[in-house]
Structure formats: C-alpha cells, structure tokens
Amino acid sequence: MRTAVKWSKTFLTVLGTWVVLLLAVALPGLLPARWQYYIYSPASVGLWMIAMIVAPILVCWKLRHWIRTY
C-alpha cells in the first residue's frame, strides 16, 4: 500500500507539472498574432520540449519529502 501511495503522488506530481507546462505554451496564443512568432519560435519550442522532460524530475526532487510521507 505504501508503494502505491508513493507512485500515485509521483504520478500526480508529473501530471501537474505537465499541465502547468501545457498552459504555459497555450496561453500566449491569446496574444496578438505579431507576438506569436517570437513566443513560438523554434528555440522556445525546443526549450519547452526539454522542459517537458526535465521539469518533472526537478519537481519530484523538490517535493521528495512530500512524496515519501504516508
């Protein structure tokens, strides 16, 4: 049971991080069209893709005490 709680907290942490990153890339779509090229440039999309992999690891490391508690 304890292992299931740890895995579920880890899953929720990763899912929450991905939701925040998806909102961060979707919300600038509400800006004027002339800004979208700079926000959705190839470099920023590449950094966002790297963040989708690296950010959940960093967030899980930061919240490791909460994940380990039962």
Image (tube, helix red, strand yellow):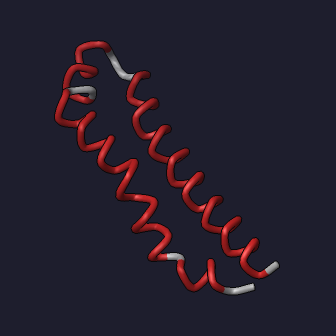
Q: In which quadrant of the rendered view does residue 49 lie? A: top left
- Residue 70 vertical placement versus 7 (above, below): below
Identify the residue at image location x=26%, y=29%: 39
- Residue 42 vertical placement versus 3 (above, below): above
Residue 46 in the image: state x and y as whole percent.
24, 38
Towards the viewer: 16 or 29? 16
Q: Quadrant of the N terminus?
A: bottom right
Residue 6 in the image: state x and y as whole percent.
68, 75
Q: Quadrant of the C terminus?
A: bottom right
Horizontally, residue 37 falls left or right of residue 54, namely: left
Towards the viewer: 38 or 32? 38
Question: How many marks are shown on the rendered structure?
Answer: 0
Horizontally, residue 8 falls left or right of residue 49, namely: right
Identify the residue at image location x=58%, y=53%: 16
Q: Looking at the image, which residue sits at the far right? A: 1
Horizontally, residue 47 falls left or right of residue 66, namely: left
Identify the residue at image location x=29%, y=48%: 50
